[in-house]
Image (spheres, rainbow, N blue to C red):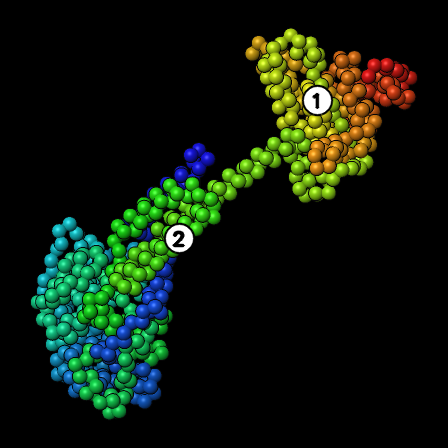
């Protein structure tokens, strides 16, 4: 439980985060990310289950062919009147004209077109309702012209618990057809509102102006095609539109999710010039729904849909009419299913993943995500339901990634523990160097100039005799632990512990040009830390320990020594190493804590004299001849001065040599 605590915390935070996102469903995420997955699923639907091509809805298009034959757009309204006459002669169910006539041309041509649409008797004209910019506040509702009121819903019902007017789409202005054309025909708004990514996925069924609500162009066209009078179509505010004997469900704003059947030209097209010239007989339009609009390049409002970036707006309206008549709009899930999925999937993964191996967990997690993806596709393909794919899937993915990462961290931590275990014998730096340079692990060695440091507790034998084993081990472990931290900070190689003694060296296996400086700095810090420990031990009623440190610099053999494959130690051997050990023993003779040889001093002398190494006093003791040697060596005490104080060197008396007989 404890080792998976981070997993449980992150998983719980992920669960809460995605529940909140699903509840509020921010438009910036929905429109830019989730909607893209919806578009992909729609395209997958058409690959797996092709949509039938309708033939009851026809688009009469002012296309490139028509413009090349008749002339540039806009055509004279006299020509457009002839086109309406031709269409009407075929006796279609309804004619929806997706062209704006908000400005007058001339009395004659305007009159001809007005005559044609009234004579047809089943024409619906588009009306422009201008929407405010995002964040723009409406000072007041626009005043619609009197003739527009004839096209408003006759009945608007409020649904209990829904303040639909607060959510309704409210235009800031109206740009209706000229009165000569508008009187005596049905009008429908042609207002579109793409998502934030510019894709037109929704159609606005109604807009609200003051106390009245106005249906869209496709809704009016579908109503007439179905033979419904206005009184049989009513608005259920924030819920839907009653269309004869069924209800078209909408969101709170009166929008529907268009079930596009495919790319442009999914519906049959007829060139306007072919009707005008007689190459296409009007009888082909009998009992069909006809939309008139432009499709030639640069003559129409280009729509970006989930299937196409080049769909004429008139064909978008044809899709909506088909959806209305078949009541097969896509419905967006209100989010309850997704929230339940988030909770259930989270609980499954949280309970199961910690008990599985990493590969098994990945298989289970990806399996759950795949099942949810297949389910989301199936609901869209077979039931026209759009459930959110992003939030539940991302939640599962984050929980899966968290557990996988946690397992990796646990494994890495175990590796670190093993590394630390071995590093306690041969130092972590040496382990790292051996990983980088495997040849170091072989038996053998090389000559290197190194600096060795020997540290030993003074009077430890007496201390052990006067204290119990538990007290001795406790205080020794504390002492060795603190000294080890100091050694590692100075990047020394912790060679070994010999009882209460510590052996450290610098200059191998990696090159360290400043190995003598590091050794002296380490020795001073070891003594400073021991002073702090002595104060602490005295306050605890314990007998404090004291130590002596000996430092020497010289050539030694460095390498692995032992039985290959069984027991090897990476260590240093040689006369200079033995000299360092003997110098440490002299700290008791000279009643000082740190002694170093003249060989180490010679490495440090330039630093001490030019000020690069400050705050150190180097005092010559004697020149001694240690047992087994014939050459005298200068011995110097090292003690700290105030920080920033120039270092001081007091030389040994060159004439005074002492021969030592003890080891």
Q: In the figure, is residue 623 to the left or right of 86?
A: right
Sequence order check, earlier mark of 2 and 1: 2
Q: Is residue 112 above or below residue 22?
A: below
Q: Is residue 662 above or below residue 292?
A: above
Query: What is the spatial separation of the Cα atoms under label 2 and label 1, in whole angstroms?
Result: 57 Å
Question: Which disc, if any, is residue 498?
Answer: 1
Residue 432 vs residue 539, the one in the foreground:
432
Taking the image as drawn, is residue 173 in sight? Answer: no
Find residue 484 and report its horizontal and vertical position in percent.
65, 26
Image spot of residue 589 (x, y percent)? 79, 12
Counting the numbered discs, the total is 2
Q: Residues within 10 Å of mark 1 (few under 14, many from 20)?
A: few
Q: Residue at x 47, y 41 (%)?
A: 406
**Mark number for residue 452?**
none
Residue 620 x/y as whole percent: 82, 19
Q: Residue, x 81% and y 36% (percent of image)? A: 447
Rendered position, 567 above or below 635: below
- Mark toward the viewer: 2 or 1: 2
Q: Which residue is label 2 attached to? A: 367
- Which of the two residues, 67 or 567, is positioned nearer the viewer here? 567
Pick out the residue farthest to the top. 466
Q: Quadrant of residue 95?
A: bottom left
Q: Using the rendered image of the protein, determine whether residue 462 is visible from the camera's viewpoint.
A: yes
> Tag 1's secondary structure?
strand
Split into 4 quadrants, where in the image is the C terminus? Answer: top right
């Amino acid at each position: 439980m404890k080792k998976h605590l981070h997993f449980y915390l992150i998983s719980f935070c992920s669960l809460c985060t995605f529940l909140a996102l699903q509840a509020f469903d921010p438009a910036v995420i929905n429109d830019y990310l989730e909607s893209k997955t919806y578009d992909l699923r729609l395209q997958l639907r058409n690959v797996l289950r092709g949509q039938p091509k309708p033939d009851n809805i026809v688009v009469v298009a002012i296309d490139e062919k028509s413009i090349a034959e008749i002339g540039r757009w806009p055509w004279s309204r006299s020509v457009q009147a002839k086109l309406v006459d031709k269409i009407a002669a075929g006796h279609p169910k309804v004619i929806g004209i997706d062209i704006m006539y908000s400005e007058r041309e001339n009395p004659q041509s305007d009159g001809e077109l007005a005559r044609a649409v009234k004579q047809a008797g089943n024409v619906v004209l588009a009306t422009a309702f201008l929407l405010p910019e995002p964040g723009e506040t409406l000072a007041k509702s626009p005043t619609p012209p009197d003739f527009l009121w004839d096209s408003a819903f006759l009945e608007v019902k409020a649904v209990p618990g829904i303040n639909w007017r607060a959510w309704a789409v409210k235009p800031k202005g109206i740009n209706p057809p000229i009165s000569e054309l508008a009187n005596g025909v049905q009008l429908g708004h042609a207002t579109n509102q793409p998502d934030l990514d510019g894709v037109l996925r929704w159609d606005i069924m109604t807009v609200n102006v003051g106390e009245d609500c106005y249906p869209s162009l496709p809704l009016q066209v579908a109503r007439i095609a179905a033979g419904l009078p206005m009184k049989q179509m009513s608005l259920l505010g924030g819920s839907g539109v009653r269309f004869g004997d069924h209800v078209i469900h909408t969101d709170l704003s009166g929008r529907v999710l268009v079930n596009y059947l495919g790319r442009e030209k999914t519906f049959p097209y007829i060139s306007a010039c072919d009707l005008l010239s007689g190459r296409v007989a009007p009888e082909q339009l009998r009992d069909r729904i006809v939309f008139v609009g432009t499709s030639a390049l640069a003559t129409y409002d280009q729509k970006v849909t989930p299937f196409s970036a080049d769909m004429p707006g008139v064909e978008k309206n044809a899709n909506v009419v088909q959806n209305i008549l078949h009541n097969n709009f896509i419905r967006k899930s209100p989010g309850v299913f997704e929230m339940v999925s988030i909770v259930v999937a989270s609980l499954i993964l949280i309970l199961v993943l910690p008990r599985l191996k990493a590969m098994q967990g990945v298989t289970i997690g990806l399996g759950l995500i795949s099942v949810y993806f297949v389910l989301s596709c199936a609901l869209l393909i077979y039931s026209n339901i759009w459930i959110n794919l992003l939030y539940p899937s991302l939640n599962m993915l984050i929980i899966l990634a968290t557990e996988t990462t946690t397992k990796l961290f646990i494994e890495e931590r175990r590796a670190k523990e093993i590394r630390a275990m071995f590093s306690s014998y041969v130092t972590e730096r040496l382990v790292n160097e051996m990983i980088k340079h495997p040849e170091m692990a072989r038996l053998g060695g090389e000559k290197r100039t190194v600096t060795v440091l020997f540290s030993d507790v003074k009077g430890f034998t007496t201390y052990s005799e006067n204290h119990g084993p538990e007290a001795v081990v406790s205080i020794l472990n504390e002492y060795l632990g603190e000294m080890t931290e100091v050694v590692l900070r100075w990047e020394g190689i912790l060679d070994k512990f010999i009882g209460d003694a510590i052996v450290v060296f610098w200059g191998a296996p990696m090159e360290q040009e400043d190995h003598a400086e590091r050794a002296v700095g380490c020795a001073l810090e070891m003594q400073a830390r021991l002073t702090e420990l002595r104060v602490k031990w005295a306050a605890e009623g314990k007998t404090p320990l004291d130590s002596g440190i000996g430092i020497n610099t010289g050539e030694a053999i460095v390498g692995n020594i032992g039985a290959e494959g069984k027991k090897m130690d990476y260590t240093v051997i040689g006369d200079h190493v033995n000299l360092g050990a003997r110098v440490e023993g002299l700290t008791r003779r000279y009643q000082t804590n740190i002694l170093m040889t003249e060989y180490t001093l010679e490495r440090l002398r330039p630093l001490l004299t030019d000020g690069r190494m400050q705050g150190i006093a180097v005092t010559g003791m004697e020149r001694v001849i240690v047992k087994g040697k014939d050459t005298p060596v200068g011995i110097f005490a090292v003690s700290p001065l105030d920080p920033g104080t120039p270092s001081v060197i007091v030389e040994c008396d060159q004439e005074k040599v002492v021969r030592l007989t003890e080891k």
